[in-house]
Image (cartoon, grey):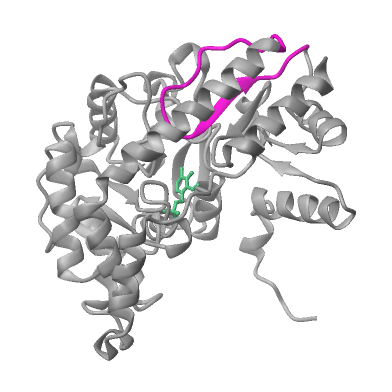
Amino acid sequence: MLQIADRLKKIPPYLFVELRKKINKARAEGIDVISLAIGDPVEPTPDAIINELCLRARDPENHRYPTDEEKGMLAFRQQVGRWYTTRYGVALDPGSEILGLIGSKEGCHHFILGCVNPGDIVLMTDPGYPAYRASILMAGGLPYNVPILAKNNYLPVFEDIPADIAKKARGMFLNYPNNPTGACATREFFDRLVDFAGQFDIAVCYDNPYGEILFDGQERLSFLMAEGAKEVGVELNSLSKLFNMAGWRIGMAVGNPDIIAAMSKVKENTDSGIFNPIQYAGIHALKYEAENIDHMLQIYERRRKMVIDSLGRIGIAFDPPKGTFYLWAPVPGGMSSLEFTNLLFDKAAIVVAAGTAYGQYGEGYIRISLTVPDNRLKEAMERIERALA
Ligand SMILES: Cc1ncc(COP(=O)(O)O)c(C=O)c1O
């Protein structure tokens, strides 16, 4: 028998791979399944971005290894710098503080490989994005779950982290607007985060791919807006959700130059950078397509209202989160998350994500994604209302 590495045995199957299998099986049996489980924008990438890709793909110069390989093209990094200045008022040096990425998911992995030694503790939130745990485990790190609870607005309470854990922690993942809860951070929270990380020498990886997906006048924030943030961490960002470019695989890490250099070193020894035409398309997106974000926000706002109203009709009333295109809703009638998701699947052929897929503190919740066309979302909510009538 060929050996498969032990490190993989510790990693649970990736949530969406399992879900996809379940959906495919039901569809093969002729069932019209509607999945509200995955956050993958369904609207196309704006035309002008696609045109830029096509144009650049015709230039043989761009068929070679990407320019400035591991870091990303200077022009892309410069445009990321301008984006951070205009959107957040944060100044970045494209030479040392910006790294192009194949999406922010890749950045999570490179952050851990760049900053964490085997046996080091890495803090992550529970509930939290499952890829963090996988990255920590693959590098031989020890994930430590920090609960984020509704009563604390889904923000970690640093004083509750035992001092011996904090002392041994070398890294921390945070993500606001938060997947899965939709909660948003505040400037005041950032100050506490910088203090805590500085006190214990913990490298922060602030994952911000939903940074612009905000409702009800919620303020757009980057962790790097906080004083001292650059001394303790990096922020990951992505074009996936903002420009409907999830499949293109383009994002960025920005912030602390030492961490950026460490991540670059990992990247340089892992892949050879982002295909130049995709970087050109990314430049175009960041430069000219910010309107797409407003356009998408109107769509998500409409769908968000549709789901909140529908859940209200079946007695699921809740304070809707102000960020991301997910709704984190409580499960009705004392059921567990899994019981409720199974019920929706069996009675209505609707797939939603069980809160427990994101950690034990997700118990009692489901996550509904708004990245489905309006007519399918309407149909899904009608089916749910009928199933629970
Ligand atoms: C919290 C979080 N981080 C990262 C990602 C991955 O984004 P990207 O497409 O940029 O790799 C996702 C995608 O769902 C996410 O929810």
Dominant secondary structure of the residues highlighted in magenta in the image: loop
The image shows residue 120 at horizontal and vertical percentages of 44, 49
Residue at 44% of width from left, 25% of height from top? 183
- Residue 284 found in image quarter: bottom left
Magenta stretch containing residue 172, yes or no? no
Residue at 33% of width from left, 71% of height from top? 53
- Residue 97 found in image quarter: bottom left
- Check the picture and name the quadrant holding the C terminus: top right
The image shows residue 41 at horizontal and vertical percentages of 50, 47
- In this view, the residue in front, 101 or 303, is 303
State left or right for residue 342 relative to residue 170: right
Magenta stretch containing residue 322, yes or no? yes
State left or right for residue 351 relative to residue 170: right
- In this view, the residue in front, 104 or 239, is 239
The image shows residue 22 at horizontal and vertical percentages of 79, 50
> Looking at the image, is 182 positioned above or below residue 97?
above
> Looking at the image, is 85 positioned above or below residue 66?
above
- Residue 283 found in image quarter: bottom left
Region rendered in magenta: 314-333
Q: Is residue 103 visible?
A: yes
The image shows residue 27 at horizontal and vertical percentages of 82, 53
Q: Is residue 205 visible?
A: no
Residue at 83% of width from left, 23% of height from top? 387
- Check the picture and name the quadrant holding the N terminus: bottom right
Label total for image: 0
> Looking at the image, is 119 positioned above or below residue 274?
above
